[in-house]
Image (cartoon, helix red, strand yellow):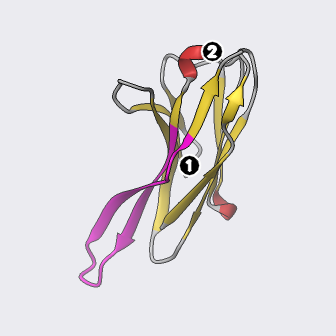
Amino acid sequence: VQLQASGGGLVQPGGSPRLSCVASGSGFSITGMGWHRQAPGKQRELVAAVMRTGSTNYADSVKGRFTISGDNAKNTVYLQMNNLKPEDTAVYYCLADLMRIKDSGEYEVSRSWGQGTQLTVSS
């Protein structure tokens, strides 16, 4: 599965950009998609995730400002970001949690990552 993210760039504080990520490929089912981010000098952290069922999970730092949504038919995940702050500056990575059934009947789970998109919040 390949992930292609779009959006990001240079945004002013208080801005409201949207990130998108499309998954392509075959042989797997997508059980969930989400976004992590990594700021300079910091570890990569979860931003938000959405399961195929629609349930969501957010980092405390973005609750109330970011909204994640998924389009299962399009294998696409969106991250609507509102009221951006300078501390939101980071490389944002899209991810997809995958599952496939092997010939043996066993389930195999894995995670695929996108290439990352830079978001800089600055005036």
Q: Residue furthest bottom?
A: 103
Q: Which residue is mark 1?
A: 53
Q: From the viewer's perspective, is the residue at label 2 or at label 1 nearer?
A: 2
Q: Which quadrant holds residue 104?
A: bottom left
Highlighted magenta segment, given as a residue range: 92-117
Which of the two labelled residues, at mark 2 and mark 1, occupies the earlier sequence position? 1
Q: SS at mark 2?
A: loop
Q: Which quadrant holds residue 65?
A: top right
**Residue 101 forms part of the magenta stretch:** yes
Residue plotted at (30% across, 78% down): 102
| Towards the viewer: 32 or 53 | 32
Within 10 Å of the Cα at label 1, are there few (<14), some (14-19), or many (20+) other Cα atoms? few
Q: CA distance from mark 2 to mark 1?
A: 30 Å
Q: Is residue 27 above or below residue 9?
A: below
Q: Is residue 77 above or below residue 72?
A: above
Which kind of residue does numbered mark 1 sit on?
Answer: Thr
**Residue 30 forms part of the magenta stretch:** no
| Towards the viewer: 41 or 30 | 41
Q: Position of residue 91 (x, y in %)?
A: 51, 36
Within 10 Å of the Cα at label 2, are there few (<14), some (14-19), or many (20+) other Cα atoms? some
